[in-house]
């Protein structure tokens, strides 16, 4: 899947992967896509919840070994 920006949050524990994603998304335009890589098991719950709360679209969520990958489309500001 194509994406506009990527962040590597591997090695970071909750809540840092979500905080890093939130910071990057604030600087992006609505509709742009961010790929987030993390290995904190809590991210499986935290990232989808963050997307739902902030009205971003979680386009993809996958797991490869201990690495989690989330692809998020920034939602429009409300």
Image (cartoon, helix red, strand yellow):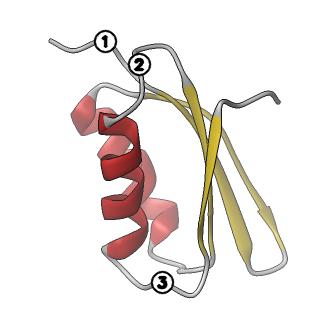
Q: Return the residue at label 3.
A: 12
Q: Kindly indicate whether the residue at mark 2 contacts the one at mark 3 (C-beta within 8 angstroms).
A: no
The dot on residue 41 is none
Neighbour tally class for label 1: few under 14, some 14-19, many 20 plus, Cα within 10 Å? few
Other residues around mark 3 within 10 Å, as few (<14) / some (14–19) / many (≥20): some
Decide if residue 56 is on the left or right side of residue 39. Answer: left
The residue that disc 1 covers is: 76
Instruction: Please state which of the two labelled residues, at mark 3 or mark 2, is closer to the viewer.
Output: 2
Q: Quadrant of the C terminus?
A: top left
* Cα separation between marks 2 and 1: 8 Å
Q: Which residue is mark 2?
A: 29
Classify the position of the N terminus by image quarter. Answer: top right
Q: CA distance from mark 1 to mark 3?
A: 28 Å
Number of other residues with Cα within 10 Å of mark 2, as a class: few under 14, some 14 to 19, many 20 or more: few
**Quadrant of the rendered structure where residue 71 is?**
top right
Position of residue 71 in the picture relative to residue 47 (left or right): right
Q: Give coordinates of residue 28: x percent, y percent.
A: 41, 29
What residue do we see at 37% from left, 19% from top? 75
Looking at the image, is mark 1 or mark 3 earlier in the sequence?
3
How far across and down, in percent of the image, does residue 51 sit?
A: 37, 38
Mark 2 residue element: loop
Q: Earlier in the sequence, mark 2 or mark 1?
A: 2
Foreground: disc 2 or disc 1:
2
């Amino acid at each position: 899947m194509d994406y506009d920006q990527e962040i590597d949050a591997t090695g970071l524990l909750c809540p840092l992967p979500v905080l890093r994603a939130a910071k990057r998304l604030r600087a992006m335009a609505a509709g742009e896509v961010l790929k987030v890589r993390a290995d904190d098991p809590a991210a499986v719950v935290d990232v989808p919840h963050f997307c739902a709360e902030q009205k971003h679209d979680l386009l993809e969520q996958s797991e490869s070994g201990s690495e989690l990958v989330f692809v998020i489309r920034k939602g429009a500001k409300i």
